[in-house]
Amino acid sequence: MKEAVEKIVTSLVGEPGAVEVDEIADGKNIRIEVRVADGDMGRIIGREGRTVKAIRSILFAAGQKHGKRFHLDLVED
């Protein structure tokens, strides 16, 4: 799933080289941390959080299929 999230995020941002995606597994819970450039954070969140909510919905559906639970975190540095 890390690769899928990375592909989605890099297609949305203005600086694709600054995208970092980390996957931290803890049993069935998998946390995906996304870091982008400061100027691209708004693009990932979207209006009223719609874009990040859509990405989380995709992860939820994939988690149901694989029997896992994915959490998407946007990390600011």
Image: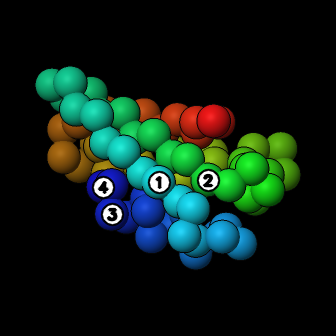
Query: How many circles with numbers are drawn on the protein?
Result: 4
Residue on which the image places disc 4: 1
SS at badge 4:
loop
Look at label 1 and name its amino acid. Answer: Glu
On the question of residue 13 being in view, the answer is yes
For label 1, the crowd category at 10 Å Cα-Cα, with few meaning under 14, some 14 to 19 and many 20 or more, is some
Look at label 4 and name its amino acid. Answer: Met
Residue on which the image places disc 2: 36
Q: CA distance from mark 1 to mark 2?
A: 7 Å
Q: Are marks 3 and 1 in contact (CB under 8 Å)?
A: no
Looking at the picture, tell me which residue is in the foreground, 38 or 72.
Answer: 38
Of marks 3 and 2, the one in the foreground: 2
Q: CA distance from mark 2 to mark 4?
A: 18 Å
Of marks 3 and 1, the one in the foreground: 1
Q: Is residue 53 left or right of residue 60?
A: right
In the rendered view, tell whether residue 24 sits above or below residue 22. above
Q: Are marks 1 and 2 in contact (CB under 8 Å)?
A: yes
Q: Are marks 3 and 2 in contact (CB under 8 Å)?
A: no
Residue 35 lies, in percent from the top left, at 55, 47
For label 2, the crowd category at 10 Å Cα-Cα, with few meaning under 14, some 14 to 19 and many 20 or more, is many
Residue on which the image places disc 3: 3
Residue 20 marker: 1
Question: Where on the picture, by quarter, is residue 29?
Answer: top left
Look at label 2 and name its amino acid. Answer: Val
Q: Are marks 4 and 3 in contact (CB under 8 Å)?
A: yes
Residue 62 lies, in percent from the top left, at 32, 51
SS at badge 1:
strand
For label 3, the crowd category at 10 Å Cα-Cα, with few meaning under 14, some 14 to 19 and many 20 or more, is few
Of mark 3 and mark 2, the one earlier in the sequence is 3
Of mark 2 and mark 4, the one earlier in the sequence is 4
Residue 66 lies, in percent from the top left, at 18, 46
Of marks 2 and 4, the one in the foreground: 2
